[in-house]
Image (cartoon, rainbow, N blue to C red):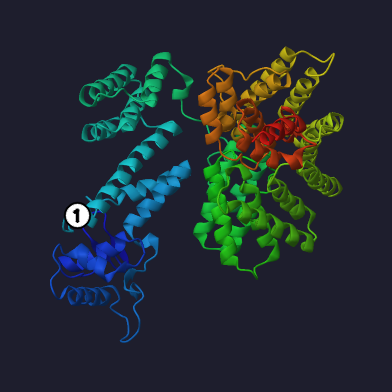
């Protein structure tokens, strides 16, 4: 049985022969249930959707339509056997068909896959080809039908444009000129469509026509809507004029154009992730595609293995792609539920470790930190019971990433790093040996033991040569800049300018990698602020500095440096509690310093309470990449200010 609604509503048997659904009301009931996507629709809702002014016997009429549809959809169902397709559920009805048997659902799923990976282009073509006219074309113009028709039409236009973009990105697309020309004529307000038409013309060797198309778009937007073209259209015009290489098709080399199954894909993704650089970015995308492909098979054990196979060491407490991480966590949690508490311990441990590693503490809110911490502890306990060292270091990675529950835990993290390093060394797990060294570097940095941190940095660099871990020298370069900054505040030490130059060089090295966007933003500005505080100077006020996620805690000091005290006071009041991550001690110290400068005892008292457990640590040192100086200095400021309240 197949149901189509992308056009007139119809049902087809397995052999392609049509099913007699009855009259218009019968088809409308079926269509309304299709639009619900498998969810139950209450009888009262169905009545209101079918009739603007329901007749007295509307519920009885609805039951008659449902009974007739059941006979049509399941003609061979034995008497008094419950229906399996159009079922009664609670106070209403639901349609129970696999999504692949409804054309609208197949189309939506194909579009979702194509958004994730270009390999789904064939499926998207097929799904677009299934459209026979406007969705629900023969259904009366009721409110629900108008709403659903408009939603599906918007998705269809998005799919047409996505298909064109994927073709252009792959190196073809010159043949799209006529199709896209008709598309922009019919939908002139869709800016992306104008850009795609210009790209297709350029691909066809018609640069002048491509530029003319973009200028037509600009004229139309300005004259009819009073709007300037968006940044994408402006950039495309500049690229065409300059003959930019970005107009050339993207070259994807990771899988050499070969379609791989989820097992092979995730193994390749894991290997590429360990190589770092651009490969890491592609590997994360391919890993999610492999997880989604495994879920579609319905094989729970396979899905669990695919999710848990990506045991790539993770160091930073802010995700590079939070949306993608959330998608992986959601898949892992769904699979854990499907496996059940009695499922294979090894699979459950890997899924729990995945939840802990992907749930980066800086990105969590509400009950998420508690759930992630619980997953880390359960994964560790299962891994210890199983006696699997590779599984245990993966679980301990999750424990480390969930160890930022409060300031002052550097010593506890050093214990975790030491165990990871010991296990990885004894059992020849070199990539986790690198992780262990970097965790211990961060911990020593937080505790102010720069000699020990430097020894871990050198050892990590030696390991990186054999593991091809390209990010390690970038991170150790930041550590050396952090050490120079600390020494610059000591008698006879290097100058502040020397430390600033080292921070700049470290920033340039980090910006040159695609590996850790979750780490990069705001780091250089925060490092410069820390350097200035070490030397008793005001915050930098260069408007070009990118404060990234640290803006709420740095803004009060920047405003103070500009003599905008009342605005600084308001910014301090608006600053939330710092996220529980590598930078929490540093951000609490900034709050303490601003509160002391502004004479705000309540804010100072909050900061002092938070910082007291970290009184022997160095602010920012937990990152191993920058420093604001000893926490004790800021704690003393905060306590003195709080005492005045």
Instruction: Give 616 or 255, whichever is nearer the viewer.
Output: 616
Image-based side of 375 in relation to 616, left or right:
left
Among all residues in the image, which is located at the extreme front? Answer: 644
Instruction: Give 507 or 548, whichever is nearer the viewer.
Output: 548
Q: Position of residue 367 (x, y in %)?
A: 57, 54
Which quadrant: the N terminus?
bottom left
Instruction: Give 67 or 448, whichever is nearer the viewer.
Output: 448
What count of labels does the image hold? 1
Residue at 60% of width from left, 31% of height from top? 514
Q: Where is residue 200 in the image (x, y as percent from the top left)?
A: 35, 28
Whether 58 is drawn above or below 245: the answer is below
Residues packed near mark 1 inside 10 Å, few (<14), some (14 to 19) or many (20 plus): some
Q: Quadrant of residue 510?
A: top right
Q: Position of residue 383 (x, y in %)?
A: 75, 59
Residue 162 visible in the current orientation: yes
Among all residues in the image, which is located at the extreme bottom? Answer: 80
Q: Quadrant of residue 488?
A: top right
Label 1: which secondary element: loop
Whether 496 is drawn above or below 282: the answer is above
Image-based side of 565 in relation to 134, left or right:
right
Whether 380 is drawn above or below 246: the answer is below
Residue 471 visible in the current orientation: no
Which quadrant: the C terminus?
top right
Q: Name the residue under label 1.
A: 137
Q: In which quarter of the image is residue 305?
A: bottom right
Residue at 52% of width from left, 53% of height from top? 293
Residue at 24% of width from left, 57% of height from top? 144
Q: Position of residue 287 (x, y in %)?
A: 58, 46
Image-based side of 278 in relation to 203, left or right:
right
């Amino acid at each position: 049985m197949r149901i189509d609604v992308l056009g007139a509503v119809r049902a087809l048997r397995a052999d392609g022969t049509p099913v007699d659904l009855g009259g218009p009301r019968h088809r409308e009931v079926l269509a309304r249930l299709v639009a619900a996507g498998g969810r139950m629709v209450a009888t009262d809702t169905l009545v209101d959707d079918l009739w603007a002014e329901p007749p007295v016997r509307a519920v009885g009429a609805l039951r008659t339509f449902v009974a007739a549809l059941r006979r049509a959809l399941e003609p061979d169902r034995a008497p008094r056997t419950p229906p399996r397709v159009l079922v009664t559920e609670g106070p209403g009805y639901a349609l129970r068909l696999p999504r692949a048997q409804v054309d609208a659902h197949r189309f939506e799923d194909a579009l979702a896959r194509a958004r994730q990976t270009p390999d789904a282009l064939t499926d998207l073509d097929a799904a677009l080809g299934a459209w026979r006219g406007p969705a629900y074309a023969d259904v009366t113009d009721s409110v629900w039908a108008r709403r659903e028709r408009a939603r599906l039409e918007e998705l269809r236009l998005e799919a047409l444009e996505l298909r064109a973009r994927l073709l252009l990105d792959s190196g073809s697309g010159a043949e799209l000129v006529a199709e896209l020309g008709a598309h922009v004529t019919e939908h002139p307000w869709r800016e992306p469509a104008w850009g795609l038409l210009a790209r297709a013309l350029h691909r066809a060797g018609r640069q002048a026509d491509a530029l003319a198309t973009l200028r037509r778009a600009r004229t139309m937007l300005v004259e009819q809507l009073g709007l300037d073209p968006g940044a994408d259209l402006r950039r495309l015009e500049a690229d065409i004029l300059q003959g930019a290489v970005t107009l050339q098709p993207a070259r994807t080399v990771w899988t050499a154009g070969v379609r791989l199954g989820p097992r092979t894909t995730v193994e390749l993704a894991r290997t590429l992730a360990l190589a770092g650089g651009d490969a890491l970015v592609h590997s994360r995308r391919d890993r999610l595609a492999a997880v989604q492909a495994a879920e579609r098979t319905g094989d729970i054990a396979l899905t669990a293995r695919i999710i848990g196979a990506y045991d790539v060491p993770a160091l930073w407490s802010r995700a590079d792609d939070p949306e993608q991480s959330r998608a992986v966590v959601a898949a892992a949690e769904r699979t854990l539920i499907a496996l059940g508490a009695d499922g294979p311990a090894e699979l459950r441990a890997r899924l729990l470790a995945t939840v802990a590693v992907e749930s980066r503490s800086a990105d969590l809110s509400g009950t998420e930190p508690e759930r992630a911490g619980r997953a880390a502890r359960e994964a560790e306990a299962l891994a210890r019971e199983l006696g699997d060292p590779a599984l245990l270091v993966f679980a301990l990675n999750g424990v480390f990433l969930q160890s930022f529950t409060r300031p002052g835990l550097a010593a506890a993290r050093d214990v975790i790093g030491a165990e990871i390093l010991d296990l990885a060394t004894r059992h020849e797990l070199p990539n986790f040996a690198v992780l262990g060294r970097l965790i211990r570097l961060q911990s020593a940095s937080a505790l102010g033991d720069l000699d020990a941190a430097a020894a871990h940095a050198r050892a990590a660099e030696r390991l990186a040569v054999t593991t091809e871990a390209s990010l390690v020298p970038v991170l150790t370069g930041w550590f050396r800049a952090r050490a120079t900054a600390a020494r610059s505040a000591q008698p006879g030490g290097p100058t502040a300018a020397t430390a600033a130059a080292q921070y700049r060089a470290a920033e340039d090295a980090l910006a040159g990698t695609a590996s850790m966007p979750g780490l990069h933003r705001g780091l250089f500005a925060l490092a410069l602020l820390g350097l200035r505080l070490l030397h008793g100077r005001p915050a930098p006020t260069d408007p070009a500095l990118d404060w990234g996620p640290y803006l709420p805690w740095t803004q009060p000091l920047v405003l103070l440096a500009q003599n905008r005290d009342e605005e600084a006071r308001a910014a301090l009041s608006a600053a939330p509690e710092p996220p529980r991550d590598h930078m929490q001690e540093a951000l609490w110290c900034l709050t303490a310093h601003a509160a002391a400068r502004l004479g705000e005892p309540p804010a100072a008292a909050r900061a002092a309470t938070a910082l007291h457990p970290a009184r022997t640590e160095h602010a920012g040192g937990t990152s191993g990449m920058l420093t604001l100086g000893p926490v004790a200095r800021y704690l003393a400021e905060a306590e003195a200010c709080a005492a005045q309240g």
